Image: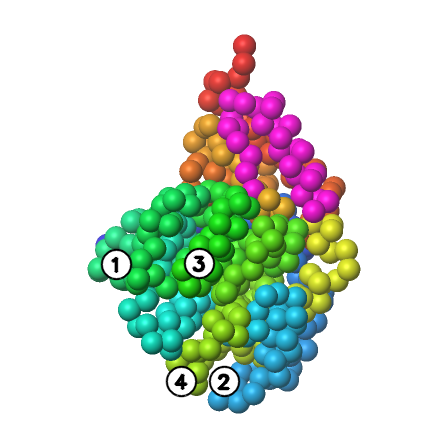
Amino acid sequence: MAATTPLYDTYLRAPLRFERGEGVWLVAEDGTRYLDFAAGVAVNSLGHAHPHLVEALKGQAEKLWHVSNLYDVPGQESLARRLTAVTFADRVFFTNSGAEALECAIKTARRYHFAKGHPERFHVITFEGAFHGRTIATIAAGGQQKYIEGFGPKAPGFYQVPFGDIAAVKNAINDETAAILIEPIQGEGGIRLAPKAFMQELRALCDEYGLLLILDEVQCGVGRTGKLFAHEWAGITPDIMAVAKGIGGGFPLGACLATEAAAAGMVAGTHGSTYGGNPLAMAVGNAVLDVVLAEGFLDNIRDVALVFRQGLASLKDRFPDVIEEIRGDGLMLGIKAKVPSADFLKAIRAEKLLVVPAGENVLRLLPPLITTAAEAREGLARLERAAETVRTNSGTAAA
């Protein structure tokens, strides 16, 4: 039978087609307006059609799109200097996606030990429920069978332990261990926060055993938690960090950040990317930082996040038969549902609100970082109507 579309059937897409966006709003082809608390899965950090990003992209597009990394790209130098100035890092490698940033991070950690005369140290400890990308290596790092099945033998060198179990981490360390890789907040895994004490214990274990701490801040970084990067809440620094999504504000852009010591093995010829760090991406990335690093921007995220948390807590109290738990930090929030999350998602979309499904029967709220308190309250009102619909339809309303 002929396919109804020439596209791969790898996505279960919602029957929605959008033609334009305005801030936190998406406008469908039929003119219907949706409040976008999905933000392209945490990608549209500054919403849709942000004027500063549009101008940066248009200005660069009129000059130069691509030259490759055979030559200096001034925008790379500029963005890298700004990133290293506000983080732990000394070195940056630019990519096109989060998966590529994670690939670079894993290679950097393995190469670090190889350069020190220990090629046997290539194993990376990761955590159950993790999601690090869709490449052969990153699905192995994530360890979820549903992503690994059917793609041949699992890439070697990754060992999963329970999330938050420091004893299991310590028991997994051996003479072949190179690094520990963790998301400070698991996104696909159901908005699960790594406790601050756990993050501090991981840092101490890495120091004790000569391991590198790799953080995946692809989803939780670039202001989403109210600090520039989520690990800052724990008062620690990694050796290597993968960043993407929000740093490009919608333009494909990722980065692998590392200390001087961690990156020492990555010499000429060991890694590369044809498109990584292209002039268009660098123009947009620099424009995103202009906004996110502006005075008061992160403070406003924390203020709006408080509106969300208070509103969601109230919804949980009023709909205990629909909502089991509120999770997350900043503007990376999760609603663990007591009803099937697919039913809740359907009701939410009917209210012209967009959210993102995740593991553990959780729905993610990932609103743009420019969301106002008034827009947050509008979204909460739509969530309330959806919860009422689900409760009525499921027949669980209290007598």
**Mark 2–mark 1 distance (CA, rounded to whole Å):** 32 Å
**Mark 4–mark 1 distance (CA, rounded to whole Å):** 27 Å
Q: Which residue is mark 3?
A: 208
Mark 4 vs mark 1: which is more N-terminal? 1
Q: Secondary structure at mark 3?
A: helix
Mark 3 is surrounded, within 10 Å at the Cα level, by few (under 14), some (14 to 19) or many (20 or more) other residues, namely few
| Residue range of the region highlighted in magenta in the rendering | 302-328
Of residue 189 and residue 172, the one placed in the foreground of this image is: 172
Q: Secondary structure at mark 4?
A: loop
- The quarter of the displayed image where residue 115 is located: bottom left
- Circle nearer the viewer, 4 or 3: 3
Mark 1 is surrounded, within 10 Å at the Cα level, by few (under 14), some (14 to 19) or many (20 or more) other residues, namely some
Mark 4 vs mark 3: which is more N-terminal? 3
Q: Is residue 287 above or below residue 299?
A: below
Q: Secondary structure at mark 1?
A: loop
- The quarter of the displayed image where residue 22 is located: bottom right
Q: Secondary structure at mark 2?
A: loop
Q: Are marks 4 and 1 in contact (CB under 8 Å)?
A: no
Residue 153: % across, % down: 22, 59
Screen quadrant of the N terminus: bottom left
Query: Disc 2 marks which amino acid?
Result: Asn
**Mark 3–mark 2 distance (CA, rounded to whole Å):** 37 Å
Of residue 104 and residue 12, the one placed in the foreground of this image is: 104
Dot label at residue 154 = 1
Q: Is residue 57 above or below residue 123?
A: below
Query: Disc 1 marks which amino acid?
Result: Lys
Asked if the magenta segment contains residue 261, the reply would be: no
Residue 307: % across, % down: 70, 38
Mark 3 vs mark 2: which is more N-terminal? 2
Screen quadrant of the C terminus: top right
Mark 4 is surrounded, within 10 Å at the Cα level, by few (under 14), some (14 to 19) or many (20 or more) other residues, namely few
